[in-house]
Amino acid sequence: MNITFYICAAVAIVSTAMVIIGTNAVHSLLYFIVSLLATGLIFFILGAPFAAALVVIINAGAIMVLFVFVIMMLNLGPQTTEQEKSWLSPRMWAGPAILAVVLFIELVYALISFHAASPDVKVVTAKDVGMALFGPYLLGVELASILLLAGLLGAYHLGRLSPGDREAKE
Amino acid sequence: MLEFLWLVPVLPLAGFAALVLLGKRITNPVVACISVGSVGLSAIFAAIAGISFIMSPPAGNGYSQTLWTWIQVGNFSPAASFYLDALSVVMMLVVTFIGLLIIIYSTAFMAADEDYRRFFAYMNLFIASMLILVLADNLVFLYLGWEGVGLCSYLLIGFWYKNSQNGLAAIKAFLVTRIGDTAMAIGLFLLFATFGTLDIQLLSQKISQYPVGSTTLILAASLLLAGAIGKSAQLPLQVWLPDAMAGPTPVSALIHAATMVAAGVYLIARTNFIFINAPAVMTIVAIIGVVTLLIAGFSALVQHDIKRVLAYSTISQIGYMFLALGVGAWSAAIFHFMVHAFFKSLLFLCAGVVITAMSGVHDIFKMGGLRRKLPLTFWAFLIGCASLSALPLVTAGFYSKDMILWQVWSSPSGGPVLWAAGLVGALLTSLYAFRVIFIVFFGEPKTAVDYKPAWRISAVLVILAFLSIVGGFIKLPMELEKLSVQAQYVFQAIAGVTSLAGILFAYLLFAGERRFVRSLLNSKLCVILRDLWFADWGFDWLYNNLLVRPYQWLAFINRDDFIDSIYDATAALCGFCNKVLSASVNGNLRWYVSGIVIGSIIIIAFVVLL
Amino acid sequence: MVKISLEFGLGLALVLFSLGLTGVLVRRNIVFILLSIEIMLNACGLAFIVVGSYFNQPDGQVMFFFILTMAAAEVAIGLGLVMQMYRKFHTLDTNSANLLRG
């Protein structure tokens, strides 16, 4: 099963790389969905089936779909692809690449100075997660629900047309 | 009766308060009544106090009256207290009576002025301050009067403030006397630091036990001398007095002829115990006196403005008083002060009448032949000039000036040089005095004049003329005594001949066509001398270039105020930092994200590596 | 069910995180930036799950659950803001939204 893990990891890395260097928005979104599916599979391999299901249903199935809806609604057209190509000259990559590499090296250094023994893997079922959520993490659940309510109201308000636009539309 | 002493300065002060507080509601006659009444009452009480002092002198020849203690800090507790002895009796009587006469004169002279009430308020305040000065028992109280007369001098010189030249003259007077005042204040500090008291009687006791000629005493005496020089317009601080003639004529008569300019003389006479113990400073006093009287005499010889001639004459006569003080002739100096007050105020008041008659013209070369039009003024002016020139035997000036010259010759710190200089000064005095008489009152009339002075003015002129003649007869017994001594008789004769010679020379030079004088002016040297003497021997030019211009230059180059620029620099630094830092707030989203990333890199590096 | 060393899992999460960070820094289109943020969030979730499974505890999944909730809310509001920005500036370029500068 180790092979599966490594294959999924490779798929995730490659598709994420394709996301950030892509110029077509919808293509990048689709690559990201592939990356999310790979991540979900990794979760499953690691013995967290609940998290795997959550990734597929919510992350890939709701959030990415929302992205797709918005991009479709904006209806930008093919000139945006040209625009993206012009913005993504190789010169632009230098600074961000350096910063990201430095951060990566630091974090890897922090990681490998941490040595621990690895016990056996055990599947953590949804029931265990549920008992943890409604047990010690109850307050967090309530807060998360309030966050979602706030997000709902905010999205509704932000999505409304302003009076000027409403008149222009009508 | 001596306990009425405190009323003498307080009554004019009350008059001042009344005039200020009653405001515009009172009319001019009421103002005149308040002023004349308060000063008149003060004069009456002064006379009462003076007579009872002379009839039955109190123990120790001095009477002290304390009103209240001003402050009490440690062992420094100056009181508002008055002291009466022979010196202050003379000063008090002169100030009150001459002040009264001049105020009566002003009620008629200033009648047309719209600031009538303000004038009399200032005059009352001046008389009150001068009386505080002469009656003060300790040097702090004296300094209060000193500053008060300086303030009133400023206010009265710049009385017609709408003309900015008058204001500038007032500022000049105040600044120059301020230099002297500051030196005097430092002298007072020094005296207090050394002797622990500023009470004059206590001070004289302590100083009489102090070693003669010590540095402290010399320093204190020099500082007090500097204060006296400032107030009395002696060298080198005499530059303010000629310009102070910008004030109304009664002001010139009262302040700059009779009283305030004698404050320096009074100070030195009052603190004579310090000067006696510092012989070096006494010599300086004498030298200053003699140089001043010669310089001012030459300057007075070439002036055009009638009031400026009298101003330089004042400087010169006070030089005589300083000369007398410098050789230790205290009573001669005060006697000369009293007589000088009489004839100088008379001369100024006559000049006021002449100027009013000429409708405000001061130039003597525009006047002529006025003796027919203004007969009373002519005789009064003649008597005044005669007294000024020390005409022998009949005028008061003769007795006082002769007394000074005799003391200068015979005193151990005097000598022939000083005496000869004094004699030359006497010659100059009669020369310039009678120059004015011949040019103004004789000769052909240059301007038509039609003026009859009011009865108050004429009465005051008559009284002062009378005093200028008889004022010296107090000394007549002493004179008759002196005639028996051969040497003194000779000196008197010499002095008398000098003044008569001066009158003769003045007649030859200045009466009629003045042909000789005009031919003199053809030579270059004479023109240079004349211009030099006209500009007061260049002192104004010297001070202007030495002190005023550098100060103005400093003010000009500092007009951005370098101290302010330190604070401005702080503000500018903040502004600069703001500009630099706000370059990092450019609204660009990815710039901010890069900032976050760099920050987190640094923090993680710290955590990981340390 | 597979025993994987902790370093590999966390290393994968780190790689994905760095890729997402690069995306945020490099892209100019706001939608891509939001997408890159999603990548980073996902990588964090992966890290949590890896550690959680390493210690056989449900806390990792619980944290991932919260992260997901937060991501959902954030995406909703973010996309609303994107729409408002498009209405205002008529472009999705982040460089044009730089009015809030000093």
Image: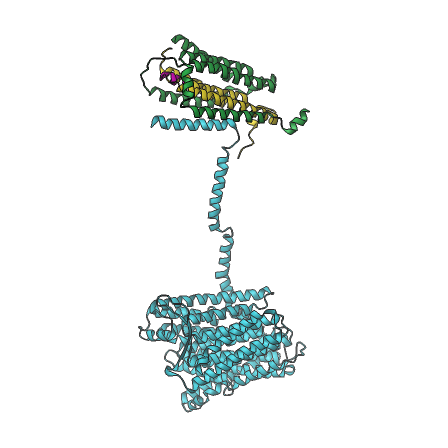
In the rendered image of the structure, the colour used to display chain A is: green
**Magenta: predominant secondary structure element?**
helix
Residue B157 spot, x, y in % from top left: 55, 69
Picture coordinates of residue A104, whole percent (x, y): 41, 21
Up-down relation of residue A155 to residue B300 (above or below) = above
Which image quadrant: the C terminus of chain B? top left
* Chain C on-screen colour: yellow
**Magenta run includes residue C55:** yes
How many badges with numbers are in the image?
0
Q: Looking at this view, is C31 or B293 the one in front?
A: C31
> Which of the pair B14/A100 is nearer the observer?
B14
Q: Nearer the viewer, residue B468 or A74?
A: A74
Determine the residue positioned at 36% across, 28% down: B606
Residue B44 location (% of width, % of height): 51, 82
Judge whether residue B83 can be spotted in this image.
yes
Name the one closer to the observer, B4 or B401: B4
Across and down, in percent, residue C18 comes to 44, 20
The quarter holding residue B403 reads bottom left
Tell me which chain appears cyan. B
Please give the range of residues in magenta.
C49-56
Query: Does residue B230 belong to the magenta stretch?
Result: no
State the residue at coordinates (32%, 70%). B214
**Residue B534 seen:** no
